Image (cartoon, rainbow, N blue to C red):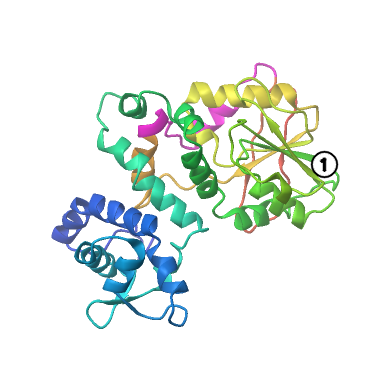
C-alpha cells in the first residue's frame, strides 16, 4: 500500500498494454540468451570479468547469427538485462549476472521460455490443464521421461533455499528431530537446514527420478523415493515447501492425509507463509498454475478448510513467518 491506495504501476495505460503485449517476446528472448550462455560468456571471456565484448565475438563463440543475436541482446538491454555501450558491444548488468549457469534464475528462464511457454500458449477457458493436451501426458510424467528437464526443474526449485532455511532454523526445535522434506527435490533445503541445525536428521522424500547428488547430503540426510499421494516416511517433523499450491483441493487434501497417517502424536509441520492474494504479480502466478495441473487458488479460509481433511485428526497448519521466531504447528488428534 502507498498513500492509502493499492500498489499499481505508474506507467500510462498505453505503456501497460504495450508491456503486456510484448511480454511473451521478452520471455522467449530471455530464455534464448540463457540457453546460449551469453551472461557466462561475458563474465568468463578473454577480457576482465564483466568486461564489454563485441556481439560478433559473442556470436562466434556461441555459434549463432551475429545480427540475430544483436537484436536479441538489444531487446534485453532495453529492459536492463545486459548493457550496450558502445553500439554492438555488450556487458553484463546486475540482472544479467543472475542468469549465469548454476543460478536458479537461469533454470527458471529455461522453464518459462521453454516447456511452460508452449503450455501457456495453449491455455484456454475450459478449466482443464493444457499440459496433457500439448505434450500428451501430465507434467510430472513428462519430467520423468525427460531427465535433463527434470534436472532443470529441480535446480530451479532450489532457488531461495538459504532464505527458506533461515526461516525454519529459528523455530523451537528440540534439536534431534528427523525432518522429512515432502517433495524435497534435490535436497538443497534440508542441506541448508541441517547445516544451521546440526543436531537434526533429514529425509528428502520425492519421486525416484529426481535429479540429485547424494554426496552433498552428508551423513545426516538420506533420500527416500516414493509418491506422497501413497505414503511418506515416518518422522518427527514435516516440511511442505512449494508443494500444496501445485494441486487442486482434492489432491492437496490427499497429500495432507498421507502426512497425517505417517506422523506420530506431537509431530511438527511447517510450511512457508503464503503470499498475499493481491498484488501486481499474484494474478500472473495464478494463471501460470492453471497450465500444468489446474492448481487451486486458495485464500485464508480455503487454506484452512483444505488443512482440516482428516476426520477426527485435525491438522493445525502454521506457516513459517518471515523474520519472526515461531514454533512449528503440531499435528494432534482431536
Residue 58: x %, y % from top left: 33, 69
Residue 251: x %, y % from top left: 52, 23
In the figure, residue 221 lies in which quadrant? top right
Assign the N terminus to one quadrant of the image: bottom left
Assign the C terminus to one quadrant of the image: top right
- Secondary structure type for disc 1: loop
Whether residue 334 is visible, yes or no, is no
Whether residue 125 is visible, yes or no, is yes
Image height check: is 136 above or below 73?
above
- Mark 1 packing: few (<14 Cα in 10 Å), some, or many (20+)? some
Which residue does the image show at 54% across and 33% down from the upper left? Answer: 244
Query: With 97 as the anchor, is 254 left or right in this view?
Result: right
Instruction: Give the extent of the magenta segment.
Output: 291-312
Inspect the magenta stretch and tell me whether residue 293 lies in it. yes
- Of residue 329 and residue 334, the one placed in the foreground of this image is 329
Query: With 13 as the anchor, is 139 left or right in this view?
Result: right
Which residue does the image show at 79% across and 54% down from the upper left? Answer: 197
Image height check: is 283 above or below 97?
above
Residue 249: x %, y % from top left: 49, 25
Inspect the magenta stretch and tell me whether residue 277 lies in it. no
Residue 18: x %, y % from top left: 16, 56
Which residue does the image show at 61% across and 57% down from the upper left? Answer: 163
In the figure, residue 51 lies in which quadrant? bottom left
- Of residue 273 and residue 69, the one placed in the foreground of this image is 69
Which residue does the image show at 77% across and 28% down from the upper left? Answer: 234
Residue at image mark 1: 177
Amino acid at each position: 500500500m502507498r498513500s492509502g491506495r493499492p500498489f499499481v504501476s505508474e506507467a500510462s495505460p498505453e505503456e501497460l498494454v504495450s508491456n503486456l503485449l510484448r511480454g511473451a517476446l521478452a520471455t522467449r528472448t530471455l530464455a534464448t540468451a540463457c540457453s546460449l550462455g551469453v551472461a557466462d560468456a561475458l563474465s568468463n571471456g578473454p577480457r576482465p570479468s564483466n568486461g564489454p565484448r563485441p556481439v560478433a565475438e559473442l556470436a562466434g563463440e556461441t555459434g549463432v547469427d551475429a545480427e540475430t543475436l544483436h537484436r536479441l541482446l538489444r531487446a534485453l538491454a532495453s529492459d536492463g538485462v545486459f548493457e550496450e555501450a558502445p553500439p554492438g558491444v555488450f556487458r553484463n548488468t546486475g540482472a544479467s549476472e543472475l542468469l549465469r549457469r548454476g543460478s536458479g534464475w537461469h533454470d527458471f528462464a529455461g522453464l518459462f521460455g521453454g516447456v511452460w511457454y508452449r503450455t501457456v500458449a495453449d491455455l484456454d477457458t475450459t478449466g482443464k490443464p493444457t499440459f496433457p493436451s500439448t505434450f500428451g501426458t501430465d507434467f510430472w510424467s513428462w519430467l520423468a521421461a525427460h531427465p535433463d528437464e527434470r534436472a532443470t526443474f529441480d535446480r530451479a526449485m532450489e532457488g531461495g533455499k538459504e532464505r527458506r532455511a533461515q526461516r525454519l532454523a529459528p523455530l523451537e526445535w528440540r534439536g534431534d528431530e528427523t525432518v522429512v522434506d515432502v517433495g524435497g527435490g534435490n535436497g538443497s533445503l534440508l542441506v541448508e537446514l541441517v547445516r544451521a541445525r546440526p543436531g537434526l536428521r533429514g529425509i528428502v522424500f520425492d519421486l525416484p527420478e529426481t535429479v540429485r547428488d547424494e554426496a552433498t547430503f552428508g551423513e545426516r540426510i538420506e533420500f527416500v523415493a516414493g509418491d506422497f499421494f501413497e505414503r511418506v516416511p515416518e518422522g518427527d517433523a514435516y516440511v511442505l515447501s512449494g508443494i500444496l499450491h501445485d494441486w487442486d483441493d482434492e489432491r492437496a487434501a490427499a497429500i495432507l492425509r498421507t502426512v497425517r497417517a505417517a506422523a506420530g502424536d506431537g509431530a511438527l509441520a511447517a510450511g512457508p507463509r503464503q503470499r498475499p492474494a493481491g498484488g501486481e504479480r499474484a494474478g500472473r502466478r495464478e494463471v501460470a498454475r492453471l497450465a500444468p495441473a489446474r492448481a487451486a487458488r486458495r485464500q485464508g479460509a480455503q487454506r484452512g478448510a483444505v488443512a482440516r481433511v482428516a476426520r477426527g485428526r485435525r491438522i493445525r497448519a502454521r506457516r513459517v513467518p518471515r523474520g519472526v521466531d515461531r514454533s512449528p504447528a503440531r499435528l494432534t488428534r482431536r
